[in-house]
Amino acid sequence: QVQLVESGGGLVQFGGSLRLSCTASTSIVSFKVVAWYRQTPGNEREFVASITAGGSTDYADSVQGRFTMSRNIARNTVYLQMNSLKPEDTAVYYCHAALGVNVVRGQGTQVTVSS
């Protein structure tokens, strides 16, 4: 069974940076797309960023210019570099990966930005 494990979350001050990692139990180029989503209590999970198997990236308007998604194929890992963090970025961040018709999800990592 394919698994995704997120790491790198934590507490950071306004304007700070964090880098999240999502490591897969299989080659990440097996996935059509890998994406980061985030969720706050009582709200729907929202799209943050994605990277396709071909390496194309896409970002939500709210993080464009502040967040960068990248990958290390040899390490089966994708990253989300988050700069200029704001309190509204506080959420649990989840890694999703499309594998065929299925979507694999990680368990999430908490990001808290203090004002």
Image: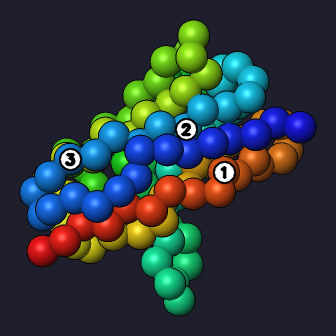
Residue named by callout 3: 17
Residue at the (63%, 42%) spot, across then down:
5
Q: Quadrant of the C terminus?
A: bottom left
Q: Is residue 51 left or right of residue 4?
A: left
Gap between marks 1 and 2 measured at Cα: 8 Å
Q: Do residues under tags 3 and 1 come within 8 Å of each other at their CB atoms?
A: no
Residue 87 in the image: state x and y as whole percent.
Answer: 22, 72
Of helix, strand and loop, which one carries label 2? strand
Instruction: Specify which label sits upstream in the sequence, 1 or 2.
Output: 2
Residue 24 in the image: state x and y as whole percent.
Answer: 67, 31
Q: Amino acid at mark 1?
A: Gly
Q: Is residue 62 left or right of residue 25?
A: left
Q: Quadrant of the N terminus?
A: top right
Residue named by callout 1: 106
Instruction: Specify which label sits upstream in the sequence, 3 or 2.
Output: 3
Residue at the (22%, 58%) spot, across then down:
12
Of helix, strand and loop, which one carries label 1? loop
Q: Is residue 58 above or below residue 28?
A: below
Residue named by callout 2: 22
Query: Outermost residue, right direction?
Result: 1
Residue 36 appears in view:
yes
Residue at the (55%, 71%) spot, across then down:
45
